Amino acid sequence: MEASFLEEEEEILNVSNIEASFLLDETDSFERESSVTLEASFIDCDENMEASFVVNQATVSASTPKKQNVQQPTSYLVNGPSSSNTESIRPLAEKASSVNIATPCCANECNKRLSLVDMEFCLEKIQDLNNVEQKQLILDILHDSSTITWDRNTPKATTNLVICGKKVCQSMFCRSYRISGSKFYACRKLYLEGVRSVVHGNNGKFVQTEKTALAQAWLTDYIERIGESMPHIKEIHLPIWMTKTLLYKRMKEEFVSRGYSSRKIITKGYFFEMWRTKFRDVKIPKASEFTVCGMCQSIKSLQEKASNRFDRAECERLREVHINHVKTEREQYHLARRRAVQEPSELTVMIIDGMDQSKTDIPHFSQKDKDTKHLAKLHVHLTGVLLHTKVPNDKLAYGYTDVKHIPHDPNLTIHCIMHTLEKNVEKLGKDLFIQLDNCWRENKNKYVISICSLLVQYNVFRQVTLHFLPVGHTHEDIDQMFSCVAKVLRRQNAYTYTEFCKVVAASYTPPIQMEEVTYVLNVKEWMSPHLAGAFGQHSKPLWFQFLKSEEKCLMRYKMWHNDPWEPREAGGLECFKSTPDVSVIPEWVVPCMDRTDIPFLMRDIPHKYGGRLPYNSYQNWKEYLESVKRLGTVPPTPTEWSFMHLVNTLDTREDTAEAPELEGLPGIRERIEITCPVITIGCQGKSASVSGTIEEVSDSSSVRIGMLAAVNLDDSTARPYIGEIVNTQDNDVDIHWFRGSYSGEWRPWNCGSGRNVMPYTSKVVTESLILWGFHLTPGKKLPQKIVNNLKDEYAKIDEHM
């Protein structure tokens, strides 16, 4: 029967209902046999692509009575597709009808064996799969329906492809599943190689977009500058007033100010997701377990009380200024550490701090219990020191322990500094950078400041810098070391002092070199008679610098890194009115044994700890407590101390002979640093614009405002002195000072911060000018010719002196 689609619509629907009625009877009492063979073809009719469906043959045979009013099927025969309703079948039917089953596929005419139901079955299995899942499906079918034979060591596959129990060829198989031949051959190749699972080519590869990399780098840098490593847990805490939304807003504003478009900035949601996955150890605590910054808390309280947007904006500005100060101060310590590793002969960096004493009591049990909680314990105090220089792991770790029998005051801090320097005298650089916290009792006092002055006075170092971080922002890498110690102590027992030292030493990389502090020298009393007087306001500045001028060590100070050194007029302040003699050895500090609880320990250790302590630890405790009791007896005055071994060691660290300059480098430098010559026409243009000597500057008419000038000052340690002439009066000129060096860049020197930035100027006499009218190179450096002239002029001045 052959008819057009429009005329035979009703008849085709009846045929479809017959096709859909192949069901298993509910009672399984009847058996039905049906076969439907459809050959369909689509005939293009016109531009609107009207389809004309031709039914070539429809044969229905049944051996038993049929059920009336047959509905759409809910299940197919064995190995057939399943569907829950007719709506889910219709899209499949449309896709199945689009498969060209009329065109012959092979000599066996496999296309005549399949029906639309078979097509729907294939499409239902593959339509919702991605590319990898589709290949996995085909590979599974090949493993179930193929066998491998070998022909001269070459594997060959014999495949029997079946669709709904009907054998088909490869071409009809691909047509039914709507896959390309290349995909089938790719799966067949995997089958021959013995592959069972298909893995995507990018599986396991980490692909990161540019904007994600930018955001991750920004957040990493911010966390390094402002985050604080917790000493008791492996976490980094941001300030408690910070929020993720505020941090994202700050990052976005910074990127926009740099010219990045919004397409180069990740979204807020992805920023949170990146934080959750990449920065799991970074937390913003609701409340800090340690002393918090008072300034941060004050700004937060004011911002909560602000009732208008102007006050809130001002609070936000002040908080931004405060955070920038903290970031800058942290950065200076990190830069100093990096320089100490890269230039160990020039700089050594040291940081000192004490660990939380509640975690270092012994006997120490990882699992606490009520029976031993109230018993006597030996309170061990651990002072940690990290020395940064060019060694494996870029640092050396030291731990100094005491049982609280000596006061925790400047004497203990000085003891740790001196012993660490003495142990590493061969690794020291010419300059020393010491990082301490703001505890006035142990660190920020006149004794620690004065001992730094003595290190320069006795030629141990060329320069010593003493740096303190702002209060509430002092957690650094030394606290990370304490965090590692606390983490190990939470998992391990330390029954005796010996075991405690072993556990602490092995808890960090590099291993901590432990030393028991039995006695300390009373350096306070030794240097007190020589101090220049009472120190005042020294608890405020964060920076102290000590350098030698005219055989005397002077101290300079400043509040923030970007501020100029004070005092500006004089070269610095003298800490001593007379220099202490290091050959005169200080006396010992008298120990105080009241806080050691020795009687209670001797009572509780053998009798009350019961089975918590191993049997062999009792004898160890007995011997150690006897040695602790002997600490109460002050030994005779020592014959030498650490400072004596450090005197004049700077001379052994002087520069070796400089290597000859690279051939051709002077010519390249001269070509790059070339300055514009002065054009002259007749007498025009001829002026004292090159330079003048001391004898030639008696006439100040050649000095002009805006010229750069080199000045001779009494302090010869910071030469050269360069500045811009901003005003001239009679025999005086006002100089706006620049900061730089012979080989480095020169920048205008300003003081203050924010809106209070002011040029750093001084009034000098014209006779102190030695060179003027020169220019800096495009790289803001002094031309080599000017450098040579300056050195010659300063040499002449020194000869006359």
Image (cartoon, rainbow, N blue to C red):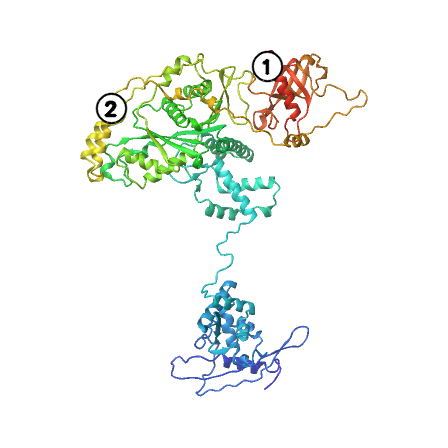
Residue 740: where, in percent of width, then height?
Answer: 59, 25
Dot 2 corresponds to which residue?
630
Which element type, helix, strand or loop, lies under badge 2? helix
Residue 758: where, in percent of width, then height?
Answer: 60, 24
- Using the image as rendered, state which of residue 336 and residue 238 is in the foreground: 336
Dot 1 corresponds to which residue?
798
At label 1, the amino acid type is Asp
At label 2, the amino acid type is Arg
- Residue at (48% x, 54% y) in the render: 204
Is residue 453 positioned above or below 87 on the image? above
Q: Quadrant of the N terminus?
A: bottom right
- Using the image as rendered, state which of residue 771 and residue 254 is in the foreground: 771
- Residue at (71% x, 21% y) in the render: 690
Between marks 2 and 1 in the image, the one whose residue lies nearer the viewer: 1
- Residue farthest to the left, as pictured: 607
Tell whether label 1 touches label 2 (CB within 8 Å).
no
Is residue 638 positioned above or below 370 on the image? above
